Image (tube, rainbow, N blue to C red):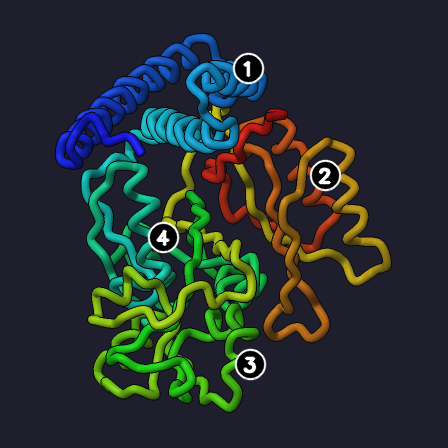
């Protein structure tokens, strides 16, 4: 076997040098994407150009072949680069469209303490906006909303649905009565693991702390543990705090591994969720709605109550289909105090600034007993452009 031409230290030094060059090039590319956004203001072209992205990826894959780079590897890297570019341009255009919202520090309320999934979502969302946070911890979804309504917080972050356990009904029920507007969204990967405060074995665990949602999302793993006592907490952060204080070998929490480090907890088992691709969608609420520029894809959320007659909901949905508006979510919740009456929550891909959305809402108003727009906001989930590799 041939010997390396460089020592390990020399090899690592060269790797570090190349990594620094990559970071510098990525920063240069980001600056250019900002110039692209400025030019699109003049031409009124949308931020995303799927045909351009496909052509770019195909060229990069072909160029990668000349360097013996796997096509999947190349597309995975540049999907991330394109996503960053799109979000960076969207954030820039939204700052121009909403100059009154510009602030270096935002007061943000969320469920639980530091390290809760809502806290991680809040940090990731506002990191994209280059905004520092003053974090306000809340014990319930109701208080997250009330703190914003009272003016003691600028924004609230709320989980709305999960790919494993479905819709989070408590949040939907709170949205029926709030005066707040949805101004943003973020989809956060949820990486559940079993956390303990002392060295132990999985078969010794018989008490498990967490928020009800993680218990539900990890139900198959919990069944495999046999007879185990499930203790519910107001958040995953509270669960981790309790386990850290108990310091018992039979007690564990469900939570994020990096968040567990904040409480001195160690991961005993990773990947315990029912679905490996486990994501939660969070919404961001504020006292005033935002203006979404027509150059970026937007989503509008509204609630409506239809008549108690056969086909009344179908009539409303046909309005969306006729106008070519894509509905991404339909959720029904009982109207408190009105037995057997349902309130429907609807997410559609559309911007309230456009004539088609205005006309659609006008038509739906005629068909419904009650309708209210909860918010129109940028779509933050950048779907990767697909190519044949």
Q: Which residue is mark 1?
A: 55
The kind of secondary structure element at disc 2 is helix
Numbered mark located on residue 197 in the image: none
- Going from N to C along the chain, the mark reached first, 4 or 1, is 1
Residue 305: image location, x then y, percent: 68, 57
Q: Callout 4: 10 Å neighbours few (<14), some, many (20+)?
A: many
Looking at the rendered image, the disc whose residue lies closer to the viewer, 4 or 1, is: 1
Number of numbered markers = 4
Q: Earlier in the sequence, mark 2 or mark 3?
A: 3
Label 1 secondary element: helix
Residue 203 x/y as whole percent: 42, 85
Q: Is residue 15 left or right of residue 74?
A: left
Give me the disc on residue 223.
3
Q: Label 2 vs label 3: CA separation?
A: 42 Å
Query: Residue 324 appears in which quarter of the rendering?
Result: top right
Please state which of residues 271 and 38 is positioned toward the viewer in this rendering: 271
Residue position marked by numbered label 2 in the rendering: 320
> Circles 2 and 3: CB distance less than 8 Å?
no
Q: Residue at x 66, y 43 (%)?
A: 327
Q: Secondary structure at mark 3?
A: helix
Q: Locate residue 42, reporting x and y percent.
A: 42, 9
- Residue occupying image coordinates x 59% and y 26%: 389
Residue under the image location 32 percent in, 57 percent down: 148
Query: Could you say which quadrant of the image residue 11 lies in?
Result: top left
CA distance for labels 4 and 1? 33 Å
Does residue 87 appear left or right of residue 354 in this picture?
left
Q: Nearer the viewer, mark 2 or mark 4?
A: 4
Residue 121, numbered circle: 4
Of pointers 2 and 4, the one earlier in the residue sequence: 4
Q: Is label 2 or label 3 in front?
A: 3
Where residue 309 appears, as percent x and y from the top left, is 83, 60
């Amino acid at each position: 076997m041939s010997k390396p031409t460089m020592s390990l230290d020399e090899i690592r030094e060269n790797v570090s040098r190349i990594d620094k060059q990559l970071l510098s090039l990525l920063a240069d590319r980001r600056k250019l994407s900002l110039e692209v956004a400025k030019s699109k203001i003049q031409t009124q072209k949308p931020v995303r150009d799927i045909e351009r992205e496909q052509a770019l990826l195909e060229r990069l894959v072909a160029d990668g072949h000349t360097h013996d780079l796997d096509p999947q590897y190349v597309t995975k890297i540049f999907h991330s680069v394109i996503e960053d570019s799109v979000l960076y341009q969207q954030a820039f255009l939204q700052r121009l469209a909403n100059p009154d919202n510009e602030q270096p520090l935002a007061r943000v309320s969320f469920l639980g303490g530091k390290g809760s999934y809502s806290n991680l979502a809040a940090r990731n969302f506002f990191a994209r906006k280059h905004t520092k946070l003053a974090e306000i911890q809340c014990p319930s979804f109701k208080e997250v909303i009330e703190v914003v309504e009272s003016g003691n917080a600028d924004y609230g972050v709320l989980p709305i649905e999960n790919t494993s356990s479905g819709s989070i009904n408590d949040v939907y029920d709170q949205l029926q009565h709030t005066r707040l507007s949805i101004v943003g969204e973020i989809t956060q990967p949820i990486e559940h693991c079993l956390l303990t405060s002392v060295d132990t074995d999985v078969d010794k665990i018989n008490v498990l702390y967490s928020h009800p949602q993680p218990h539900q999302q990890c139900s198959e793993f919990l069944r495999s543990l046999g007879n185990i006592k499930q203790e519910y907490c107001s958040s995953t952060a509270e669960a981790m705090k309790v386990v850290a204080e108990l310091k018992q070998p039979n007690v564990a929490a469900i939570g994020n591994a990096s968040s567990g480090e904040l409480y001195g907890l160690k991961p005993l088992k990773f990947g315990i969720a029912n679905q490996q691709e486990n994501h939660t969608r969070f919404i961001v609420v504020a006292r005033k709605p935002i203006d979404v520029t027509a150059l970026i894809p937007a989503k509008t959320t509204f609630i409506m109550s239809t008549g108690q007659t056969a086909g009344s909901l179908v009539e409303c949905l046909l309005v969306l289909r006729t106008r070519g508006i894509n509905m991404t979510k339909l959720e029904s919740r009982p109207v408190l105090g009105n037995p057997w009456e349902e309130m429907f929550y609807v997410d559609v891909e559309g911007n309230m600034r456009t004539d088609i959305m205005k006309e659609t809402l006008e038509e739906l108003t005629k068909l419904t007993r009650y309708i209210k727009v909860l918010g129109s906001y940028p779509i933050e989930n950048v779907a990767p452009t697909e190519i044949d590799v």
